[in-house]
Each structure stands twice: as structure tokens, then as C-alpha cells.
Image (tube, rainbow, N blue to C red):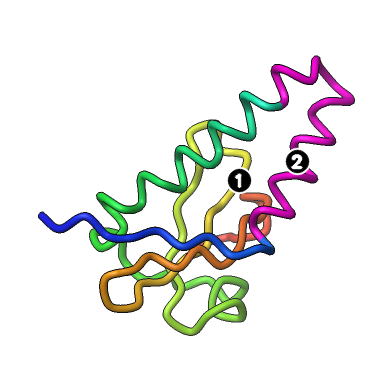
Amino acid sequence: MQILEVRISRRVFRKIDGIVDYVTGLTSQENARKYGRALIAEILQLAIYGRSIRKSGSVVAKMIHPEAKTVTTRNRKWRIVFHIEGDCVMVDDILFSSMITR
């Protein structure tokens, strides 16, 4: 098994910052930071199992990248959109899971 390098786009980091800001309004700042770190940890796990996920059939995901793959986070609130380039997992976006129907 080969461990891949994970590259996260600036767009994803900005969205996670926005998510943390939103969660801060609902709970404490420390809980929001933990939530953000948990999202990043889930993204980094794609280094291990990213190749085993099949390509998405979703139109929304394919609009982001033609070879897009998606995975739902543990809490089922978010969908991580990524693709594989060589030995790298390129994380393209993070969306509400309800936006992707397949």
C-alpha cells in the first residue's frame, strides 16, 4: 500500500475557516477549532485510502473536476471532493453533503 501526498487547495482552507467561524457562533471557540481540526484530519486520511474510492457520478462533483471522487465526513454533514494526480491526492472542495445526490 502506497501512502499518497495530500494537497489541500486554498479554497478548502478558506471554507474550513468559514465553517469554524460559523460553529464558533453556536458553541465555544475551542470546540469550533476542534471541529476544524477534525475536518482536516479526515481529509488527511485520504493519503491512505484515496485510491480505493471510485469516481463520483455526481454532476456537481464533475463540475469541480472531471475525475472527481467524493467522500462523506463522519458526521455526514460535509462531502470532500478530490481527485488523484500521480502520487498526490488533490483536495478540490468541501461541500454540504446534501448538494451531492449520488
Kindly identify which residue carries mark 2.
19
- The image shows residue 61 at horizontal and vertical percentages of 56, 71
Identify the amino acid type marked 1: Trp
- Residue 84 in the image: above or below residue 7: below
Helix, strand or loop for the magenta stretch, by majority: helix
- Which mark, residue 78? 1
* Front-most of residues 69 and 90: 90
Residue displayed at 48% across by 84% down: 66
Furthest toward the left, the residue is 1
The residue drawn where x is 84% and y is 35% is 22
Q: Amino acid at mark 2?
A: Ile
- Relative horizontal placement of residue 95, taking residue 71 as reference (left or right): right
Q: Estimate the x, y position of residue 92 in percent, counting from the top left.
A: 56, 67
Judged from the image, the secondary structure of the residue bearing numbered disc 1 is: strand
Q: Which residues are magenta?
A: 12-32
Q: Tell me, yes or no, whether the two marked residues, 1 and 2, touch with CB atoms within 8 Å.
A: yes
Closest to the camera, between mark 1 and mark 2, is 2
Question: Residue at left 81%, top 17%?
Answer: 27
- Under circle 2, the secondary element is helix
